[in-house]
Image: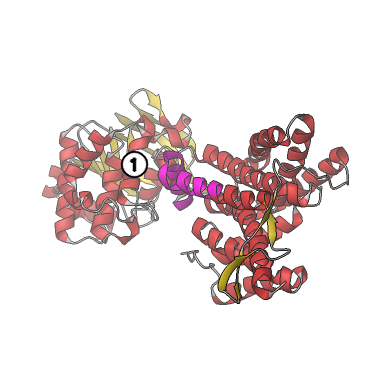
Amino acid sequence: MEFGPHLVLALIEGAVTAAVLALTASGLSLVFGVMRVVNIAHGEFFMLGAVIAWWVTQSIGGHPGWGFAAAMVAAPLMVGALAVAADLTVLRRLSYDPERTIVATIGLLYIIQQLTLMTYGPEARPVVAPFDARIALPWPERGAEGWQIGWPWGLSTTAWKLAVIGAAAAMVGALWLFMARTRAGLVLRATQADREMATAFGIPVERVYALTFGLGAGLAALAAVLIVPIRQAHYLMGGDPLLLSFVVVIIGGLGSLPGTLLAAVLIGLSDGIISVFFSPTLAKIVATLMVALVLVFRPQGLFGTRAP
Amino acid sequence: MLRLDEIVAGYGRARVLHGVSLSLERGEILCLMGRNGAGKTTLLRAIMGLVPLSGGAITLGDERLDRLPAHRVPRAGLGYVPQGRRLFAGLSVAENLEIGLMARGGDSGLRDEVLGLFPRLAARLGQRAETLSGGEQQMLALARALCLRPDVLLLDEPTEGLQPSMIAAIREVVAARRDAGVAVLLVEQRLDAVLPVADRVAFLENGRMGPVVSAGALRADRSVADRYLGV
């Protein structure tokens, strides 16, 4: 295959990574922005979303679409509820202290991971996509009769990958609308701006924190449901999304939703392109290098604000 | 209306207020004065439930405020303008007001009423709060508190660092609220800024209550102020 079509495939792979990463990292960024909690267990909420998706799709027979639709609802709700329970029983008791909550979420990571290993097992299990048609992609070619649209061999993708990109973009858009246009979003932003003043104006901050932690975990679970037909559900699958989410929120600026989205696109596309043309390991090295550069030259991230 | 009985409060093990008692009546402005570190801001924060009490009671009407969770205190009818304004910086003027309205179910009618008091804010509804001038930010802080339709207004140095025209505008609004029956507890550093509007002046020293005198008496004899303010 020539370079051009090859690049298109790399961009599609990168866009899938970016879309899922944007959704996952938005949850991490939201939790840090509003609660100032660095949630090390975020990747495990992602993993749980994938495992619940497998369980739900296995439990519901008939067309794979039914099971998948049920998983899209059940996984974020169940994972979100678990996160709310973790907030009420662990984080609230620590008064959301930044250092102690890091240790607590590390503990939560191992508890969730090991409980999943004990119940779900060590196997990687596939989830069937609701639809998986292969779509050939057109490419302009110059022939004897000038420019023509051709269909090069191998230049194709699956309908599900395009659906993942579209669905994740729609969900991130919905999250932005929720934050910018609804009263609940306004309450979250006010709490993010000044916790004490939010309390002085009648906002039940601890309840807001619990819901934020649930929402952040739910977003990670939703991202996992979208990607699990491509990557399979496994009890150790939370590591990469956690690492890349941290890369994204550090580059974008902790707590900044626009920064998170821009950084997710940047990291996702570079990951896709470098992985296809060189190697996935080099892609991770480049991402880590970008974090190092941001930390040296703009520690608050691209869209973050310096602490006063 | 608002009654403080022997309240004791502080930060961690450091006790700041040592049994402060005070009462505030409907339709009066009580000014609280004292040197830096006397505990004035801590007192307002304690009333709002932002600093936990280790003793005493705070009552609004028949309701014990100190037994409520902090977020329920403003809903009971207290509006707070903190020192340094502390607006929700990333939010617009309209959104800052919306937060105030949400606390006690205020509607657009109340918002328009409050904006009628501050026409400069009405022209800047979409502007981010941190881009306003200092005077406009103070107006917004006061407007945000008035959106709760408070029975008691707590103001912590609302005229600090403002030009005279802004001070006059804010003083006018506060006096109008007092005339409408709102009880105002005003913390100020400068006696000159207080005497034109205050009905009574209370002095606080090292977290303990000093004398409470009428503004008229203080205008006639400033010796009490000289003793407690060190001027």
What's the residue at 62%, 60% (across, down)? A15
Whether residue A81 is visible to the viewer of this picture, yes or no, is: yes
What's the residue at 67%, 49% (across, down)? A160
Q: Which residue is mark 1?
A: B98
Q: Which residues are magenta?
A: A170-193
Q: Chain of mark 1?
A: B
Whether residue B19 is visible to the viewer of this picture, yes or no, is: no
Figure quadrant of the N terminus of chain A: bottom right
What's the residue at 33%, 56% (across, down)? B128
Farthest residue in the front direction? Answer: A145
Q: Is residue A236 above or below residue A267?
A: above
Q: Is residue A255 above or below residue A125?
A: below
Name the residue nearer the viewer: B4 or A216: A216
Residue B61: x %, y % from top left: 33, 25
Residue A232: x %, y % from top left: 79, 48
Name the residue nearer the viewer: A139 or B131: A139
State yes or no: residue A179 in magenta: yes
Instruction: Tell me the amino acid under the disc marked 1.
Output: Glu
Q: Is residue A308 above or below residue B110?
A: below
Name the residue nearer the viewer: A30 or A150: A150
Q: Taking A292 as reference, is A231 left or right?
A: right
- Main SS of residues in magenta: helix
What's the residue at 75%, 68% (across, down)? A280
